[in-house]
Structures are given as structure tokens and as C-alpha cells.
């Protein structure tokens, strides 16, 4: 039979109705789980995490900042997403130099978010909806307004002096250490005691001295305090930098270009993590995830392999590092990074799968297509990817509706200490500031912190006051209310996809295998668990794309599809529409 005739009779009946009415094929046969022991199965592996940036989620008192009562108001919405875990950025008492990542009191709530009673009501609301709560623990550093630091800087013989890292000025300049936020470096002179203190981030964020056992016990006591409140896990902010080599050796010039290698995973970090495991994690049956995974796979495994008795999950930065500049996304690199990390953790350990968070621009700008024609399918494709990979998927608030970057071409609108610090560094280095601002406008983490877009009312329904951050102008077109009842919306596709993941254990525990990795526009892979097998095909292109999968015996059914139909012809040749994402059951 000639090719034209095959085209004429191309089979397009795998999905005969719209994508959100597609029958969801359940993979719940008892054989599905035969190779997964009960010991290997855990709630945090099977979880779907939703990250809430609290000051941007929902404001109820009109001060322009999100609060706990706003989250409580939206608990049913959060539950409707099908997620099972929530991680919330810091809400501790803080001078807010770095939006709460500078903690002044680890047991107190910042008044803008509410009271401890409000927190407890919110936590209870999550738990009643079977949603676990993950607390952001910022213990590589504190605020310089923390009582520990106030005492530490007051005199050299103060009992709290060794809670932080100090270098006496009479010894001369301290060995250079790079600061991620301060172009002058990580040592700050303090005249009170004629000494320098260390700050990996802003000068208002002095690094805690983890080499001091009293500091470690303080941290464990704080974690116990919150565990006894009922939190289910901890996200350990910047924790790979907590241990320091206090002999302060000289680092070679230019070492900061490989920052994680020189500043992460220092001498006694694993000793401290094992201590934390025994003191807190094991006793309270909570889990902990490390921000960062070191600079090698060995580093990552040493953090999270079960027999290490340290942390339970790590997430790496390679997936976001590949898209820091405009038009820098390459599908080939994307495939390579995720395939390499999956392979490294195929037998042991566990990682997070994420494409965006509070430290990055929006996923649609970096990996998808923001044009009106393709924003919906490309966001659906990215969410399909996140929820069909091995590892615990992390979704950032707003990505379930396709929120985009906000245009901020001039520095005056930036408030983030990271952005301002980078600008000062660019000036000091004599960089092209026009080019710098173009990159900052695209990649700034402020893009991912704009208020949640709930509806078409003033300020997108986020607040009745003046929002702390300007609402994106496109909120009248991109919001929850518009998408709520649209079966083809990004929001409802996300809900369907979380349901698919929960009802198909093969997407959680199944082996991953990439197919035709050299294909220029389609990312195809299988997930296999015992006798169950699914195929995921994702067209990362604004054009139609074909892939012929002769290695697949039979496409049995469509599990989910973000278009109404999918065209399949002889030899399992699949023709995908722009940004089409389909999961098939196969054998």
C-alpha cells in the first residue's frame, strides 16, 4: 500500500473526545507493585508537592502581603489541584532583607502572616485534607537581628561568640570568600569587636557556625518545636554550605566560578546530617530535603541514600541552570540532564523533579512558549513532563495556570537583594549594563514572586490594598476564575495529570528509558513497572512533529492528551501538534 493511502487512513481515534474527558487508565493491578517493597514505598516518594510563596498567595487584611488566613481561604482550591504536599517559604519573624530568608526568631511568626494560632489553623486545614506540610528551615545563616548574633557581636568573650564565624582584624585580611549577594565578598568588618564575620549571602545574613555543637543543638531543638506542632517535613535551605573548613585555607583565584565545589559539602556536613537524623528525623518520622545536591552524583547519594541515615531527598540545579539567559534552552541538553540524573538514581536514593521555584523565573518563559497561541499547550506539556517522571514532582504556585514573567526593564522596580547585588557586581566588573538588564529582566527570581492571579478583579483578587509587588498586567487573561470551568484549560489539565500520576504507580516507581534521544523536537520515554508500561511523548516545538516508534509493539490506549486527538499511522508513526503531550498505555 502506498504512503499516501496510509496517510488517508491514519488512525486518529485514540482520543475521540476532548483531552479532559479522556478515560484515565488505572495501573492498579497487584502485579504493578511486585518489584517495589513496602520498605521502598513512602508518602514523600508518592507525593505531589505544591510550593506556596506566602506573601504572594492571598491577602485578607488589605496590607498588600499574603497571609495565613489567605491560604486558609484557598485550602479547598489547593486540595482541588490533587497535590498531597505543600512547601511554604519562610514566615518566621524577620527584618525581611531577603524576604524572610534572614530569620530573627525561629519560633515566632512575622506579624504580616498572622499569629501562631493562624498557623496552627492553616496546618490543621491541610492535614484535614490529607496534605502534608513542609517547613522551610533557614539554618545555614540567621539574620543579623537575631538575638544570637546581637550577643555574638557584642564582645569577643560573649557565650554566643562562637555561634558565628569571626576573623580578628589584627590577623590581617581574612582569606577571600565569595558572597552570592555581596560583590565585596563574604567577610564583613564589624567595628564593635574589631573583627570580620562571614556571610555567604547578604551581610545581613551571617553564617551560623555549625562546627559549634551548641549551634547544632539549637537547630535540632527548633526543628523539634515545629515537628511537635505537626509539620511533616523540612526543606533545608542552602544546607550544603553549612559546614566550613575553619582552618580557612586560601582558595585559588577564580574558584567562585565553581561555587558549589568549593563552598558546598565541606568536611563535616555528613556528620552533622547524621546527627540531625538521629535527633529529629528518625524520632519524629519526618522527612528532609536538601537544597542542592553537591557537585557530583556521589555527593548527592551521600546525602540521600537510605543507608546513610541523613536526608531523604535532594534536588539539583542543572535543570534550571540550562535556561538562565534568553533563548538558551536546548531540548538536547534538557533530555541529557534529566536522563543522566534518573540513571544515577535508578537503584538508590530519591530526587525532586522541578522546573521552577521562588529562586527562578517562570517555567513557561524558560522552557515553553508564552505566545497566546502556544502558552496553554506548552504549559500543559511542561506539567505533563513534571508529573510523569521518576522523582517527587514540585510545582510552583501559579504554574498550574501558566503564570508568566513580568516585564521589568529598569532596575528601579527591583527589590530583591539578589538582583541588586548582581547589578552592583556588574557595575564593578564593567559589564554591558544594557545586556545585563536584558538578562535580569528574563531571569530574575522576582518574575516568580508576583501575586497569584485569582480573577479579573482589581489586583487579580490577590488584595484589596496595594500589592507588595505589581501584579502582572496579563492577569485579566491568565487567572484561576477563567480557567476553573474550562475543561481544556491549563488548570484542569494539571488536575487531570495529578490524578493520572496518583492512579498509575508506574509513573512513580517505574523504570525510565529515553527513546530516540537524538530527535530534535520530541522528547519520548517509557516508564515500566513489572508488566505495566506507558509511553510519554512530548513535542517541544511550535510546529507539527513526527516520530516513528517501531520499537513499540502496540499503543493500547491514551491515558491523557492535551489535544482532542492524536494521529497515529502505520508502524506507530505518531504525528504531534505543536506542544502536544500524550501518555499512552503500551505493551
Image (cartoon, rainbow, N blue to C red):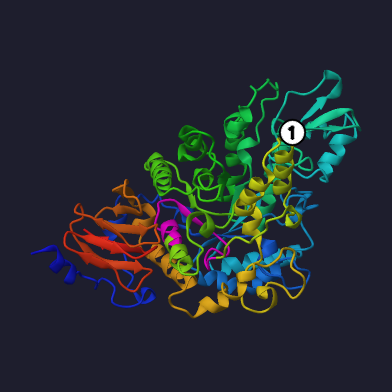
| Left or right: 331 as drawn, with respect to 476 | left
Which one is in front, 229 or 517? 517
The residue range painted magenta reads: 382-402
Q: In which quarter of the image is residue 257?
A: top right
Assess disc 1: are there few (<14), some (14-19) or many (≥20) residues with their C-alpha within 10 Å of its C-alpha. Answer: many
Does 513 appear above or below 169?
Answer: below
Q: Does the magenta stretch include residue 464?
A: no
Q: From the image, which quarter does the C terminus lie in? A: bottom left
| Left or right: 204 as drawn, with respect to 18 | right
Tell me, yes or no, if residue 177 can be seen here. Answer: yes
Does 565 appear above or below 279?
Answer: below
Residue 398: image location, x then y, percent: 57, 65
Q: Quadrant of residue 177?
A: top right
Q: Is residue 396 magenta?
A: yes
Residue 520: image location, x then y, percent: 34, 50
| Left or right: 476 as drawn, with respect to 62 | left
Which one is in front, 546 or 84? 546
Residue 95: image location, x then y, percent: 81, 52
Residue receiving disc 1: 186
At 74% from the left edge and 62% from the top edge, which residue is drawn?
116
Tell me, yes or no, if residue 265 can be seen here. Answer: no
Outermost left residue = 1
Amino acid at each position: 500500500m502506498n504512503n499516501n493511502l496510509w496517510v488517508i487512513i491514519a488512525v486518529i481515534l485514540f482520543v475521540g473526545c476532548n483531552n479532559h474527558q479522556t478515560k484515565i487508565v488505572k495501573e492498579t493491578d497487584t502485579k504493578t507493585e511486585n518489584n517495589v517493597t513496602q520498605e521502598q514505598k513512602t508518602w514523600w516518594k508518592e507525593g505531589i508537592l505544591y510550593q506556596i510563596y506566602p506573601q504572594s498567595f492571598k491577602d485578607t487584611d488589605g496590607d498588600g502581603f499574603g497571609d495565613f488566613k489567605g491560604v486558609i481561604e484557598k485550602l479547598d482550591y489547593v486540595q482541588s489541584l490533587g497535590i498531597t504536599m505543600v512547601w511554604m517559604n519562610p514566615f518566621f519573624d524577620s527584618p525581611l532583607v531577603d524576604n524572610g530568608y534572614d530569620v530573627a526568631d525561629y519560633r515566632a511568626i512575622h506579624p504580616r502572616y498572622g499569629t501562631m494560632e493562624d498557623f496552627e489553623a492553616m496546618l490543621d486545614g491541610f492535614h484535614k485534607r490529607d496534605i502534608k506540610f513542609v517547613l522551610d528551615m533557614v539554618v545555614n545563616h540567621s539574620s543579623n537581628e537575631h538575638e544570637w548574633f546581637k550577643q555574638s557581636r557584642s564582645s569577643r568573650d560573649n557565650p554566643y561568640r562562637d555561634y558565628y564565624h569571626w576573623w580578628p582584624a589584627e590577623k590581617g585580611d581574612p582569606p577571600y570568600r565569595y558572597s552570592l549577594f555581596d560583590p565585596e565578598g563574604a567577610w564583613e568588618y564589624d567595628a564593635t569587636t574589631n573583627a570580620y564575620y562571614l556571610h555567604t549571602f547578604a551581610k545581613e545574613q551571617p553564617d551560623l557556625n555549625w562546627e559549634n555543637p551548641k549551634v547544632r543543638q539549637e537547630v535540632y531543638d527548633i526543628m523539634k518545636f515545629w515537628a511537635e506542632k505537626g509539620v511533616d517535613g523540612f526543606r533545608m535551605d542552602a544546607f550544603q554550605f553549612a559546614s566550613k573548613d575553619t582552618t580557612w585555607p586560601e582558595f585559588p583565584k577564580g574558584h567562585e566560578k565553581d561555587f558549589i565545589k568549593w563552598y558546598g559539602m565541606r568536611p563535616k556536613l555528613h556528620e552533622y546530617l547524621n546527627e540531625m537524623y538521629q535527633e529529629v528525623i528518625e524520632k519524629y518520622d519526618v522527612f528532609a530535603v536538601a537544597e542542592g545536591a553537591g557537585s557530583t552524583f556521589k555527593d548527592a547519594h551521600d546525602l540521600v541514600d537510605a543507608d546513610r541515615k541523613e536526608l531523604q531527598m535532594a534536588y539539583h540545579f542543572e535543570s534550571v541552570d540550562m535556561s538562565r539567559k534568553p533563548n538558551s534552552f536546548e531540548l538536547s541538553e534538557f533530555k541529557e540532564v534529566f536522563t543522566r540524573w534518573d540513571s544515577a538514581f535508578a537503584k538508590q536514593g530519591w530526587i525532586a523533579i522541578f522546573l521552577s521555584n521562588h529562586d527562578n523565573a517562570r517555567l513557561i518563559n524558560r522552557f515553553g512558549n508564552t505566545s497566546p497561541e502556544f502558552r496553554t499547550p506548552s504549559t500543559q506539556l511542561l506539567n505533563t513532563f513534571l508529573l510523569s517522571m521518576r522523582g517527587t514532582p514540585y510545582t510552583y504556585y501559579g504554574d498550574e495556570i501558566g503564570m508568566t514573567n513580568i516585564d521589568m526593564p529598569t532596575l528601579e522596580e527591583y527589590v530583591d537583594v539578589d538582583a541588586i547585588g548582581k547589578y552592583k557586581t556588574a557595575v564593578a566588573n564593567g559589564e554591558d549594563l544594557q545586556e545585563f538588564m536584558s538578562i535580569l529582566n528574563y531571569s530574575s527570581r522576582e518574575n516568580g514572586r508576583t501575586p497569584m492571579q485569582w480573577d479579573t478583579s482589581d489586583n487579580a483578587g490577590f488584595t484589596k490594598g496595594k500589592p507588595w509587588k505589581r501584579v502582572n498586567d496579563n492577569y485579566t487573561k491568565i487567572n484561576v476564575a477563567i480557567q476553573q470551568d474550562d475543561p481544556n484549560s491549563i488548570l484542569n489539565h494539571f488536575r487531570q495529570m495529578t490524578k493520572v500520576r496518583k492512579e498509575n504507580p508506574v509513573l512513580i516507581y517505574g523504570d525510565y528509558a529515553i527513546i530516540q534521544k537524538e530527535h530534535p523536537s520530541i522528547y519520548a520515554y517509557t516508564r515500566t513497572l513489572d508488566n505495566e508500561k506507558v509511553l510519554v511523548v512530548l513535542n517541544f516545538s511550535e510546529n507539527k512533529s513526527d516520530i516513528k516508534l517501531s520499537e513499540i509493539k502496540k499503543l493500547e490506549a491514551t491515558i491523557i492528551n492535551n489535544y482532542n486527538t492524536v494521529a497515529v499511522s502505520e508502524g506507530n508513526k505518531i504525528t504531534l501538534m505543536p506542544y502536544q503531550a500524550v501518555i499512552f498505555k503500551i505493551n
